[in-house]
Image: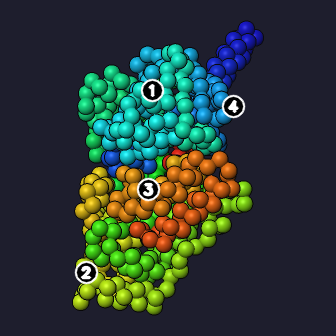
Amino acid sequence: MKNKLIVILFICVAMIMAACSEGENKSGAEGSVKQELVLNAGSEPASLDPALNTSVTSGWILDHMYEGLYTRDQDGNITLGVAEDVEVSEDGTVYTFKIKEDAKWSDGSDLTAEDFKYSWERVLNPNTGARFAYYLFVIKNAEAYNKGEVSVDDVGIKVINDKTLEVTLESPTAFLDSLMTIWTFYPVKKDIVEGNENWTLDAKNFVTNGAFYMTEWEHDNKIILSKNDDYYSQDDITLKQITFEMVDDATTAYQLYQTGDLDFISSIPTDQLSAVKDSDEYIEFPYYSTAMFIFNVNKEPFMNRKVRQAFAMAVDRKSLVENVGQTGETPAFAMVPPGADTPDGDFRELGGDYFKEDYDQAKRLIEEAMEEEGWSEFPEVTLMFSTSDNNKRYAEAVQEMLKQNLNIDLKLANQEWNTYLDTLGRGDYQMGRMSWTGLYIDPAVNLEYYLGTSTNNRTGWVNDQYDQLLKDAQVEQDIMKRFELLHEAEETLMTDLPFMPLYFLTKNYLTSTSVKNVAYYENRSPVFKWAKKTE
């Protein structure tokens, strides 16, 4: 009997130990999931200096490293970021920001009001050459300082104390909170920036104030970000590491995604779309962006407006989006995409289309232009685009359409992204591919691309009436009148046509089902700040 009791006790103990072991293993299995993600950035960042960057892809990386006074939550709503409070004067021109006491840099030092003052004045300094400096022109005397007309001391940015920043505007700006979420308003650390003029080229130089900081950068290969334990909201961050790979070939990236080497891709090969569209991993998201071909109006044949109009009329956009893109894009006959609300409805729906495709009329316009310019033969034209499978497909389709509809032989040339931007910036092109995403959702941000003073406007087109309309709209307090001015500005732009709109974008992603809590935005790349790997 005694022996039986011993056996029974042994079995019970073994069962209890097995149960405990099973529970520990199960818990360990869940806890053993590495909180690391591998995403595809596609290419080497153009710049990771918040003051100098104009690229959405580079901005995607910056959005994980830095945070402004305002930010977005997981649902895309504007909320306070490193600012814990803001007071606005009765006339709407003075904003007083209180910065969170626990807001710090990734090296553990305090984030201060002086950091923002320094960073914003650096953006505005004409010697910096910041292409997005005009976003800060809502600040009093910011534009005048950028143009060298006043001193930096006249700019409406004032430090009250270490954690209090006062910003005075030129006029009340209803969209200021949305505007200040873009990376141009991110702070940078003065001693880092001024200690090395090439500080943005080495991971060790990045001291950031966001959820992650850079720990490794193999140029043209990958960037690795690690969780910033000094981030004020670090308890909300589950991921320990994000790797941004730089695979510019969509097919290769897709294959890496299929093998699990990538957790996310934003460029899906056309021949794979039908196979993935019904997958739980496929996400199609509206995007506040316009794809277009821009014209250099200072080079033949695009000095003649009739040529620009003819090219715009000679492209079958429906065929492009259905047969080339196949990802939900919509034909574009204007600059501002759908998505900008006005008191009367969507800005694009109210504005409508500004032209229609008409191949016969396009041929007549080419004939008239040749007669006006004295061309016996139509000048040779080269369309340039940045290297990618998607851009190449669109370029080849348009090449075929212009040959068929206008009997014009379009030559094609491609360059790596950074080289391409430099080429366009020098004006060493005739026709180029570009897309423009509103970094905040308002028609003005799309139309300002073609301001005569905009360094993003690489077309050479300057129209004083257009510039004045946008300037008037910026300070107009009557919201209905403001949108009237913006519609008038778009009409002016679409009459001169320094570009030809192609389509309004839709973003298409593949995200592993093991990745949860990704924030998808309609005008920014997905943010993985709150993401979690579950298996």
What is the CA distance from the residue labelled 2 to the residue labelled 4?
59 Å
* Cβ–Cβ under 8 Å for marks 2 and 4: no
- What residue sits right under mark 4 in the picture? 90
> How far, Cα to Cα, is label 3 from label 4?
31 Å
**Mark 1 highlights which residue?**
117
Residue located at (72% from left, 56% from top): 343
Which picture quadrant has residue 146? Answer: top left
Specify which label sits upstream in the sequence, 3 or 2: 2
At mark 2, the secondary structure is loop
Q: Could you tell me residue 425's position as x and y percent?
A: 29, 55
**250 vs 362: above or below:** above
Query: Mark 4: which amino acid?
Result: Glu
Q: Position of residue 121 (x, y in %)?
A: 40, 31
Instruction: Indicate the position of residue 321 as horizontal and vertical percent values.
Output: 51, 72
Give the amino acid type for the residue marked by disc 2 in the picture: Pro
Of residue 334 and residue 260, the one placed in the foreground of this image is: 334
Mark drawn on residue 451:
3
In three-dimensional space, the C-alpha distance between marks 3 and 2, rounded to whole angstroms, equals: 28 Å
Nearest to N terminus: mark 4 or mark 1: 4
**Position of 373 compared to 99: left or right?**
left
